[in-house]
Amino acid sequence: MKSASARHLLVESEEFCNELKEKIANGEKFEDLAKEHSKCPSGQDGGNLGNFHQGQMVPEFDAVVFNEAINVVHGPVKTQFGYHLLETTSRND
């Protein structure tokens, strides 16, 4: 079974999500922005979601985590919770 580790940052608007992605691209730390802005409890841990198996997260998450490049910030990814920036930190295919 496929598994991965990832971190994310959850906000309410696509515009704000894009602003944060730009800040990361300009050198700000993902972890710091997650602690400051993420609406998910994982934000307090820098957005770290730990290790999980394919199918444990919402489909929109799985599509990015199990198919897109590792150590790249992807998003905004829209789910029923809001808009996410997602970074897969490791993956076991």
Image (cartoon, grey):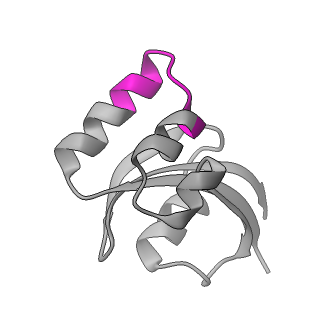
The image position of residue 2, as x and y in percent, is: 76, 73
The image position of residue 16, as x and y in percent, is: 23, 42
Residue closest to the eye, 77 or 16 = 16
For the C terminus, which image quadrant? bottom right
Residue 7, visible in the rendered structure: yes
Q: Is residue 58 above or below residue 4?
A: below
The answer to which quarter of the image holds residue 60 is: bottom left
The answer to which quarter of the image holds residue 52 is: bottom right
Residue closest to the eye, 19 or 58 = 19
Q: Which residues are magenta?
A: 21-31
Residue 67, visible in the rendered structure: no
- Residue 57 shown left or right of residue 9 in the figure: right
Q: Is residue 33 above or below residue 11?
A: above
Residue 57 counted in the magenta span: no
Q: Is residue 39 above or below residue 53?
A: above
The image position of residue 23, as x and y in percent, is: 39, 24
